[in-house]
Amino acid sequence: MFDIFAQTPQIYRLLFDLWLKINMYSHDFPHALERIELLFVTIKPALLGRGAPAKVAARQPVQPSDADPIAPEMAFAITGHSPRRFYRRLVHLVDLLVRAARGILLECELDVDGPGDAQEAAEAAFTVLLGMWQTAEDRRSLVWALRDGLLNLVVELNTTRPTYGTRLLLDWISQQAIYVKVLRALSPGGQPILFGNSEVDMTMQERVAILHSSPSRRAANALINAQRDGRGSKDWPTHRARCQSIRAAIDKYVLQFYSSAELSPLDLRF
């Protein structure tokens, strides 16, 4: 890529020409703003020299010396190598951005002052919740919301007016059911979990059944029954060793797909 740019430096000139004279190519402010946003995203990586992309990937600060030396020459060529005229074009570009932003603010003001829609508000709230949960370090807030009946609300809204946002949230909640605390919040006491999809609901019930018949639970019940019969002290050491061996094999298998940081010991056994 660097060799191609060195052979055809006009690419830089076209890029700066479009950036500085955007109003000449697009007279409609909203469309011009979209073009400018795209240019701002692409112009920085286009101007980097050799070795600079590695610094960007490593999140290291990029210095002016990291720019391709051909780029400034081609940029100033647009204005006849006059820094004054170059910066004048930049100021004009800022004025264009301000005028475009005013139009967007007016549209936003009309939307805010307009009559609200309860379903749209709920969908927006779901989007915010999903973004918050996906970036959270734990699942406490998700568990609290599920205990308060969030799943029923999402399923009802998805049935009434299905959208991409509600489907995405339902899919994500179903994936989180691999964690014990989330599954318990979805099914307190082992009650059915209804996602509105027969296959997903069946899978959830299978998970709940596994949770309530886990090896740890069976081992604990076996110990209690053995102690009641008076043979716990004799049989339990052998039984405990067998349970530990099975658990170690299961843990080794699960860790092929998940790291120990992703799953707690309880989730790992589940």
Image (tube, rainbow, N blue to C red):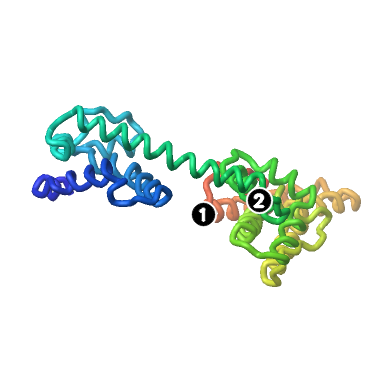
- Is residue 159 in sight in this rendering? yes
Mark 1 is on which residue type?
Phe
Q: Position of residue 56 (x, y in %)?
A: 31, 37
User: Tag 2's secondary structure?
Assistant: helix
Q: Which mark is residue 257?
A: 1
Mark 2 is on which residue type?
Phe
Question: In the image shown, does 34 or 195 lie closer to the viewer?
Answer: 34
Q: Quadrant of residue 160?
A: bottom right
Residue visible at 90% across and 53% down in the picture: 229
User: Tag 1's secondary structure?
Assistant: loop
Which residue position holds label 2?
126
Residue visible at 67% across and 67% down in the picture: 200
Report how far apart the C-alphas of labels 1 and 2 lie in the structure. Answer: 29 Å
Residue extending farthest to the bottom is: 198
Question: In the image shown, does 263 or 128 lie closer to the viewer?
Answer: 128
Is residue 228 placed above or below 97 in the rendered structure? Answer: below
Residue visible at 23% across and 28% down in the picture: 64
Q: How many marks?
A: 2
Graded by Cα atoms within 10 Å as few (under 14), some (14 to 19) or many (20 or more), the crowding at tag 2 reads some
Is residue 178 placed above or below 53 in the rendered structure? Answer: below
Question: In the image shown, does 210 or 60 lie closer to the viewer?
Answer: 60
Q: Position of residue 77 (x, y in %)?
A: 13, 38
Q: Position of residue 66 (x, y in %)?
A: 22, 32
Indicate which disc, 1 or 2, sits on the residue closer to the N terminus. 2
- Is residue 215 in sight in this rendering? no
Residue extending farthest to the left is: 7
Q: Position of residue 39 (x, y in %)?
A: 32, 45
**In the shown orientation, is residue 119 left or right of residue 34?**
right
